[in-house]
Amino acid sequence: MLPPEWDVRLVDRNVDRLHDADLEWADLVFTGGMLPQQLDCLEFIRRARALGKYVVVGGPDATSSPRVYHEANTLVLGEAEVTLAPFLADFSRGTPQPVYQSEAKANVAESPTPRFDLLKFDRYNHVGIQWCRGCPFNCEFCDIIELFGRVPRAKTSDQIVRELDRLYDLGYRGHIDLVDDNFIGNKKLAKQFLPVLKGWLEERNWPFEFTTEASINLADDEDLMRLMREVGFFAIFVGIESPDTETLIAMQKRQNTKRSIAESVEKLYRAGFFVNAGFIIGFDTERGSVAPGIIQCIEDTSIPAAMVGLLYALPNTQLTRRLATEGRLHQDSDLQPAGIGDQCTAGINYDPCRPRADILRDYLEVIENVYAPKAYFARVARVGRMLESRGRRYRPSLRRWARETRGFFRMAARIGIRGESAVPFWRAFLGTLLHNPRSIRYAGALCGLYVHFGPFSKYVAGQIRQSISRADQTPSVVAVAPVRRERVRPAVTV
């Protein structure tokens, strides 16, 4: 969306270092990110301003908490298709304003093809594209509906084809993640789009495979699961949050109720998708320890990659507004705590209804149980046997196979030679190879995630123990009774 005559460099601080020479070269610098990138983004703004550069900031965190980014020259908030063009026009006239903001939602059918040519593909496990924005559900803790609305807006099939053509022409092959907030938010549109995608893939001999995020009611639609599997979707992220029905109703996540979570997840496995899932601890409706129930849910569903976090009241959500009304929201709740670089240990930015130390003990119990090597790889083994992988059309190129083979040996050296993970790892990997060899790539990918989850879970456990110690030394005050409702790191462009 920048003027075509501009010379542009992209520095992704997840995979690249930003050198002073990059900033000295630039006339104008753009950056932005989500809440986890906040501290790094602020540090970067100060660095760029110290070199006399004009800094423009956008993205979801700046849109939700513009006051945090006051050190930037200009804030371009909301959806950039709406607010970036006015800034560019003013800047070209030499009259840029401090803030550009609009509540209007973009017509994504007019969004341009991203500058994929600026990416260094060899630095990434996968590339992300976006088909649809928004989600039809109304979860109290979620800011997606605040940022993008509850009416899903999708790009046209022709737009996505152009984006895939661009990636294909640039030589990219392999895994693409559709970063939609809920890929099946509009099932009718998804069913219209998937056959077009299938035709494009057939014409080019299946160069890509896909992952995405979807609500668990995908398991109720056999036709949609079939269409997704036919084009090469192999994994989805699902927000389970809690196995407790009362908690799900209170958080307004009714789509997860009146169903067996374990049966729904097994349907997804049988349809060919392995499942990553999110769980949250810290809701007002929790009665006593919730750790056993969450652990049992994770085991019953055999989900290896269970993203468990503490409840965080995100800016501009229904949850945050309620907590503020009740006088329970902490001051500066939208600021990332200094020294904390993850969302797993930064939660509970409010006064909870049960003792903070009890919530933290539950969290510690879940983390230490589900990421114990024996438990983790046993879940991988079960998924490896259940996952349906017959009929997949995507075949990795020789280059991709070579890369994955090197990755396998690096993984095996890290977790398969010594230590408590070695025996469970080989049992899961070889068991899948023996009983369901078509799924070995995906079981291997789940094993590979433990290279991160193993040490990270130990880090989180250590941080939580320190937090428990501090919480035990602080008197706990329950602010109010639970409210029951029945539905009554950033990239830098220079």
Image (cartoon, rainbow, N blue to C red):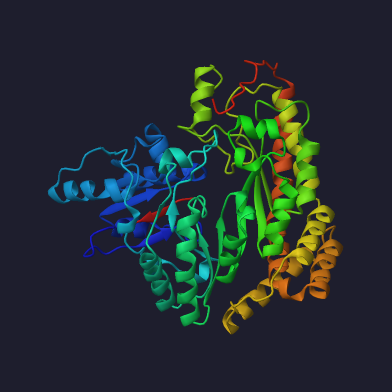
Q: Position of residue 450 (x, y in %)?
A: 72, 58
**201 or 462, which lies in front?**
201
165 above or below 454?
below
141 above or below 94?
above
113 above or below 105?
below
Say which quarter of the image contains residue 219. Answer: bottom right
Residue placed at 23% from the left, 60% from the top?
Answer: 3
Q: Position of residue 468 (x, y in %)?
A: 73, 29
**112 or 358, which lies in front?**
112
Is any part of residue 313 visible from this angle? yes
Instruction: In the displayed orientation, state which residue is furthest to the left.
Output: 93
Q: Quadrant of the N terminus?
A: bottom left
Q: Position of residue 61 (x, y in %)?
A: 43, 41
Q: Position of residue 387 (x, y in %)?
A: 73, 65
187 above or below 341?
below
Instruction: In the displayed orientation, state which residue is furthest to the bottom.
Output: 398
Residue placed at 36% from the left, 68% from the top?
Answer: 158
Say which quarter of the image contains residue 130. Answer: bottom left
Is any part of residue 53 visible from this angle? no
Q: Quadrant of the C terminus?
A: bottom left
Say which quarter of the image contains residue 323. Answer: top right
Judged left or right of residue 108, residue 131 is right
**81 or 358, which lies in front?**
81
